Each structure stands twice: as C-alpha cells, then as structure tokens.
Image (tube, rainbow, N blue to C red):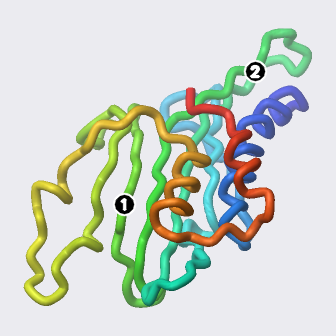
Amino acid sequence: MNRRVQDALDAHTRPIIRAVKAIVAEQVFVTLSPHASDPTARVAEISSPQGRPFRLKTEGRADRLWLRCRVSLRVPLPPKSDSPDAVEITVDSYAYQLFRGDGQTRLDEVVAYHWTPNDPAAKRSWPHLHVGSAFLDPVARREPWLLHKTHFLTGPVSAAGFVRMAVEEFGVQPIAADWADRLAGELPVS
C-alpha cells in the first residue's frame, strides 16, 4: 500500500479508534482484506481481537456491559503510487452493538446500530437501530417480537455518537480523561 493510501486510511480510522478508546482499554485493530466485488480495493475493518466484544467499565450496574464495533471502509488501491488523484476512502458498512452478560456463556444484545448498504443478504440497506434481546422477560421468556425485529430508521451513526450514547444513557464509564474531546473530534460518517 502506498503512503498516500495509508495516510488516507489513517485519517479515517484514527478518529474512530480514538472514540472507542475513550471507553475501551484493550487494543483496537485495523485489518485489511480483499474487497468481495472490487479487485482494485481493500476493506479495512476496525474491530477487537478476533472480533470479540470489549468489556466496558460501568458503575452501579449489576450486569456487565460489552461493546462490539465494526466499521468497514472501502480502500481503493490506485494503480500508480505517484498518482496525483486524492484517495477517496468511504464507509462500506458499520455495526455498533452494546451487550450485557458475563462475556463467557451469555451476551444479550441491548442495542445495535447497523448500516450495510452493500450486503445483498441484509433486510434493510439504510441506517437503522435494533432494540436487543436483553429486553426479553427472563421469567416468561416473552419477546416483544415486533420491537426486536423492527429496523428503526436512523441517520448515519458515528462511532463517537455510539460511544457518547453508551456513556450518557447506559452509564459506561470513560477511561480517558479527555473523552468528551475525543468524541467531539470524530469525522462524520459519509
């Protein structure tokens, strides 16, 4: 990968990682893989090691909360390393998920934001929210089926927006003193 492509990729991934690292102590990875339908592009995916959820620090909660953040970026590979054209990296998809559980035997999704416009198997191609299975009644095992399966329309959601929601609405404790500044600086989803 040439330097211009690497710089453009860093410019897109740095703010996402910075936002996630406001609440996550573990290392965050960026991996590159071939794009399924475009041989001149790669997909950069931001995730945790082996795609496992990150454990989050919470105060005053009996259950543990976990985060999974996957952002796929389309990274074009210009044919010439000296090409003067700007490198245009685009968001291919995202999935931000908040879970509760012990992390070993049980993880129940609390809330998830998805956008998978290029996935032919996806039921909806627009950005949407799912209310998770964590809202099942554990005694009666009754699920508000329509609620859990409904794709609530949202606008584009950034990693910073999701992290802010986790902090402000679910009591996730920031681990970085400058967490608010980190979240204010992320680039919007394009």
Please tell me which of labels 1 and 2 falls first in the chain: 2
Residue 125 vertical placement versus 139 (above, below)? above
For the residues carrying marks 1 and 2, which lies nearer the camera in this image?
A: 1
Residue bearing the label numbered 1:
111
Between the residue at mark 1 and the residue at mark 2, the CA separation in whole angstroms equals: 34 Å
Residue at the image position 25 percent from the left and 69 percent from the top:
133
Residue drawn at x 35%, y 67% as measured from the top left: 110
Quadrant that contains the C terminus: top right
Amino acid beneath label 1: Val
Query: Residue 87 bears which disc, if any?
Result: 2
Badge 2 marks a residue whose secondary structure is loop
Quarter where residue 22 is shown: bottom right
Q: Position of residue 189 (x, y in %)?
A: 57, 32
Residue 135 vs residue 22: left or right? left
Q: Give x and y (percent) for residue 143.
A: 12, 70
The quadrant holding residue 86 is top right
Total marks shown come to: 2
In the figure, is residue 138 to the left or right of 64? Answer: left
Q: Nearer the viewer, residue 169 or 118?
A: 169
Q: Position of residue 102 (x, y in %)?
A: 45, 88
Q: Which mark is residue 38?
A: none
At a point 35% along the width and 68% down the height, the residue shown is 109
Q: Are marks 1 and 2 in contact (CB under 8 Å)?
A: no
The residue drawn where x is 40% and y is 46% is: 114
